[in-house]
Amino acid sequence: MICPHCHQNSSRVIDSRPSDEGRVIRRRRECENCGHRFTTFERIEQSPVLVIKKNGNREEFNRDKVLRGIVRAAEKRPVTLDEMNQIVAKVETKIRATGENEIDSRQIGEYVMQELAQLDDIAYIRFASVYRQFKDINGFMKEVQEMMANHQQNNSQADEK
């Protein structure tokens, strides 16, 4: 590994530990030439997944873009950044589990909404209102009514147990 300080190619690993729920190895290194210490991260190189946008364009899947949408939907809600990052990780896992190199943006939105619906109703409705682009109040009300029906069904199932 090349030292960022003196640019020599001789360093040794001082410490190594898992990071990002075991998906990354964090290594502390020390340059054998100048003694400078620095950190490197080792992760599995994954093939890129292309997202097919509504207009037919393709772009590489971007975790940050998904996270930004979730952050906007969950603004001023009791949803932690850690919970939002977990949603992004679950969505990415679902995407990669398909085994496909391309995925429709609508499918990503559905995955996000599935996760948000379990976490926070208001964040779910906010995300759905942007994602589904409700044309009028009727579409919005239909979504809210479906959500309420699902809650009632889940509550009655929980009461039976």
Image: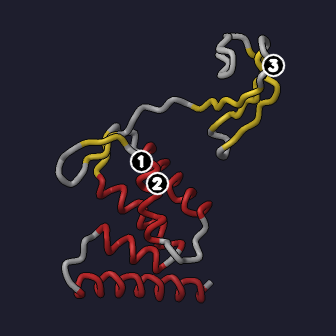
Name the residue located 49 percent from the left edge and 48 percent from the top edge: 93
Residue 146, picture quadrant? bottom left
Quadrant where the image shows the C terminus: bottom right
Q: Secondary structure at mark 2?
A: helix
Alpha carbon distance from label 1 to label 2: 6 Å
Residue 150 placement (x, y as % from top left) = 43, 82
Label 1–label 3 contact, CB within 8 A: no
Name the residue located 24 percent from the left edge and 87 percent from the top edge: 137
User: Which of the two marks, 1 or 3, is nearer to us in this view?
Assistant: 3
Which residue has dot 2 on it? 91
Quadrant where the image shows the N terminus: top right
Task: Look at the image and tell me whether residue 85 can be seen.
Answer: yes
Name the residue located 19 percent from the left edge and 78 percent from the top edge: 135
Residue 22 placement (x, y as % from top left) = 67, 41
- Say what amino acid the circle numbered 1 marks: Ile
Q: Is residue 122 above or below residue 81?
A: below
Q: Left or right of 129: which side holds 124?
A: right
Which residue has dot 1 on it? 95
Of callouts 3 and 2, the N-terminal one: 3
Alpha carbon distance from label 1 to label 3: 43 Å
User: Which of the two marks, 3 or 2, is nearer to us in this view?
Assistant: 3
Badge 3: residue crowd in 10 Å (few <14, some 14–19, many ≥20)? some
Which residue has dot 3 on it? 35
Badge 1: residue crowd in 10 Å (few <14, some 14–19, many ≥20)? some
